[in-house]
Amino acid sequence: MRKVVSPRPSGHTPAHLLTSLADLLRTWLPEQRWFAGKGRRVTELSLLSVTELHPTCLHLLVRTGQTSSPSQPGDCYQLFLGVGDELPPRLAHARIGRASRGPLAGLTVYDALQEPRSADLLLERLRTAGTAGPLRFERDAKVSVPAGLTPRLLGAEQSNTSLVYGDAYVLKVFRRVQPGVNPDLEVPWALARQGCTRVPAPVAWFRTSQPQVATLGVLQPFLPDAADGWTLALEALTAGRDFADEAHELGRATAEVHLALAVAFAPGAPTGHGSRRLAAAMIERLDATSRSVPELLPYAAGLRGAFDELAALDSGRPVQRIHGDLHLGQVLRAGERWFVIDFEGEPARPIAERRRPQSPVRDVAGMLRSFDYAARSRHPWRPEWALRCRDAYCAGYAVQARWDPRAQPELLRAYETDRAVYEALYEARHRPDRLPVPMAAIARLAEHHPVQSGGPHTPVPSFHSAQGG
């Protein structure tokens, strides 16, 4: 850039800066993959905090609202905005626009996370710890992160943004921010203290104290030679290769993580009528989704049968902390070893809900559906491939955990059904051309084909809202 002007927050209130940014952000935000309000115009915009990280880079927490959804609370997003006279051609893709009024009038605004200088500065903040306004940068004192690591954006994410530094570390920046400690920091940190090596341990992180305490990003070791499970499964399908051995080892890895979680966090005490409350919540989600996705209506009664069977079970099912959004895109294989990543859970759900103890069968159900989804993603559809993967995964889980999730068919079916309902809603909103994938699962689950230990069962496609993020 040939000219730089510093828009110092100390000289301008957030409302003053918003005069320059509002029109630009209303257009730019809905175009981002991590923006939750797809298809709805941003009508309300406010700056919750503004921090100058360096003279041409501002850190913002922005709250958005949409009048088309007046009953929905606004979302808070984390932005890194660069400001300067003009952008070099290599950064043209990062351009947000040119401000026409306010304190930034005449200056170009861009996504600073795509600029190496700003990415370098962010790593330096994490390396040395300290504060910048309401932002606090912290690290594991036992780990020394070297300086000068070359940054690059990891392009596969949807709900967050990740920067890889020198193929040694990866920084996940949480775009949609909620109050509280993010599970993607809390859980890997606790597992590291337990000596669990299946999950990369956090080495640094940053958070904010305004307007409320919230986790903003986590730095962890990067596995440069690893491939995610989704990619590996599709490669196996394309080559006509079986994936059962890999699925068996993945089952063992999942159980190992679950066992470590049960030690790292106090298990949830069984409560009376727990199965009934869980079933009621699933029925509520089904009814709400049926109103938004009318294609579900012919199957609603059959799907509700899965939840009725769950409600009839004895209460007091064991619960604990789990992953919460487990599928093939959330696991990495390096050599012969599986690693589990992305403990954020479903970003659309409140953090308090994501931190709540749940049955580990929920994670198992998510992975089983993922095998089926992979099988349906290649033609011709190979249900026997998914069937072998599902059985091998459960068998591997049983070896490590000393109990087989297929021994709880009602609970497993209910979680798979609940996941399919979630998939249908997501696909209808974001990728309507792919709605037939979860609808195929909906049709089969509505016919009540329980999963039997070691026996045949109907494979159900799964869904990947974020491959690696």
Image (cartoon, rainbow, N blue to C red):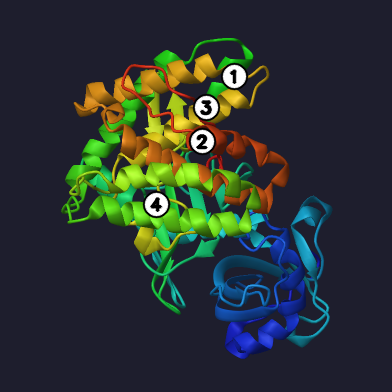
Q: CA distance from mark 4 to mark 1?
A: 28 Å
Q: CA distance from mark 3 to mark 2?
A: 13 Å
Q: CA distance from mark 3 to mark 1?
A: 15 Å
Residue 349: give x, y in percent of width and height: 46, 59
Residue 329, numbered label: 2
Q: Amino acid at mark 1?
A: Glu
Residue 87: give x, y in percent of width and height: 80, 61
Mark 4 vs mark 1, foreground winner is 1
Please tell me in which quadrant of the rendered image residue 79 appears: bottom right
Which of disc 1 and disc 3 is earlier in sequence?
1
Q: CA distance from mark 3 to mark 4?
A: 26 Å
Q: Within 10 Å of the Cα at label 1, are there few (<14), some (14-19), or many (20+) other Cα atoms?
A: some
Which of disc 4 and disc 3 is earlier in sequence?
4
Q: Within 10 Å of the Cα at label 3, are there few (<14), some (14-19), or many (20+) other Cα atoms?
A: many
Q: CA distance from mark 4 to mark 2?
A: 15 Å
Which of disc 1 and disc 4 is earlier in sequence?
4
Please report the residue visible at 49 percent of the width from the left and 50 percent of the height from the top. 171
Residue 372, numbered label: 3
Mark 3 vs mark 4, foreground winner is 3
Q: Amino acid at mark 4?
A: Asp
The local secondary structure at tag 2 comes to helix
The residue beneath circle 1 is: 235
Q: Within 10 Å of the Cα at label 4, are there few (<14), some (14-19), or many (20+) other Cα atoms?
A: many
Please indicate whether residue 457 sits to the left or right of residue 77 in the image. Answer: left
Name the one closer to the observer, 339 or 113: 339
